[in-house]
Every structure is written in C-alpha cells, then in structure tokens.
Image: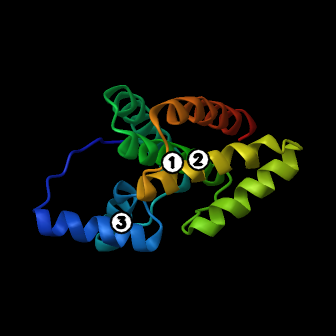
Amino acid sequence: MIAASITLPAKLGEKLKAKAEETGYLPEELIVELISEGLDEKVDPEDLVEHYETLGEKYLTEAKELLKEGNLVQASEKFWGASALAVKRAAAKRGLMLEKHGSLWDFVSLLSRESKDKEIVRLFSVANALHRNFYEAQMNKEVVEIVAEDIDKLIEKLRRIS
C-alpha cells in the first residue's frame, strides 16, 4: 500500500467533503473509490482490509491528539471515522463492502449476533453519538474523553472477532 498526500484546490476539497457526506463515505475512502473508477481498476478486498486498517489507525491517532488539544468536534468525527473503518475492515475481511451508513448498522448487528456480544452494538452506538457530536457540538471534553475509551474497546473487539 502506498500512502500518499494529495493537495486539492479549496473548491474541489469542499466538493469532496460534501460528496463524501452525501454518500456516507469518509473523504479518503471516496478518493480511493473515485480513483479506482477513473482508472477502471477494481479494488481488491484484501487491499481494502489494509486500507481500512491504515486509515483507521491514522484517524484514531488524530482523534486522540485533537482531544488533547481540546478540538472536541474534530476529535469526535475522527473517533467516528476510526470506528466506521473498523467495521468496514471486518466486513472487507469477509469480502463485503459496506457503502451506506445503514449497512454499517446491519453488519454490526450481524457481528453482535454471531459473537453473542451485545456490547458491540452498544459501543457502536457510542461511536454514532460522536458522529452526531460533530454536527451538534453538544458534548463537553469530559464526556468525549470517557466515550473515547469505548471507541478503543469497540475497535479491539472488532479486531478480535474478524
């Protein structure tokens, strides 16, 4: 896997963010999708597993740093992104590609049933609350710090069962 940094003109960057939000992708995921379509190259599920793992670790590290800095809104979204990517990684390990927000919930529900671990659903609900916090900025630092611990727990559970 090649890690690359891409600098976009502001207008394209804003369009990318808006399209990612509209389609349920994270911006970096959408870039991969657009490039693979543009090059007429299908992304291999094994490559997706690696991509999701790498990007998820990046988001988790950034989230923790943003939390330390007190940027709760951006930290919340990065924690959400790391969680969503952990779910997508687990799905990709099964050859599945989850593209919509609802499909994440369906897959989390499936993993919970299969593993007989209802806590997976509860922890993913916490991640979803962080995603909502990105838009509504309603959580204080203490709350985000506490629920960040749940994100680590969720990601670890997903790694173990996938």
How far apart marks 2 and 3 lie (CA) works out to 29 Å
Q: What element carries label 1?
A: helix
Question: In the depicted view, which residue is nearer to us: 18 or 53?
Answer: 18
Q: Which amino acid does label 2 sit on?
A: Ala
First of labels 1, 3 by sequence position: 3
Query: Which residue is under mark 1?
Result: 80
Is 41 positioned to the left or the right of 162 in the image? left
Q: Is mark 2 on a helix, strand or loop?
A: helix
Q: Image quadrant of residue 2?
A: top left
What residue occupies the far left of the structure in this picture? Answer: 9
Q: Image quadrant of residue 155?
A: top right
Q: Which of marks 2 and 3 is in front?
A: 2
Q: Label 3 near label 1: C-beta < 8 Å?
A: no
Q: Residue at x 45, y 33 (%)?
A: 141
Query: Which residue is under mark 2?
Result: 127
* Residue 119 position within the rendered picture, expressed as x and y whole percent measured from the top left: 79, 41
Query: Which residue is under mark 3?
Result: 36
Q: Which residue is drawn at 20% across and 63% down?
A: 13
Q: Residue at x 34, y 72 (%)?
A: 19
Q: Looking at the rendering, in which quadrant would you find the C terminus?
A: top right
How far apart marks 1 and 3 lie (CA) works out to 25 Å
* Residue 81 visible to an observer of this rendering: yes
Question: In the depicted view, which residue is nearer to us: 64 or 87?
Answer: 64
Is 9 positioned to the left or the right of 157 in the image? left
Q: What element carries label 3?
A: helix
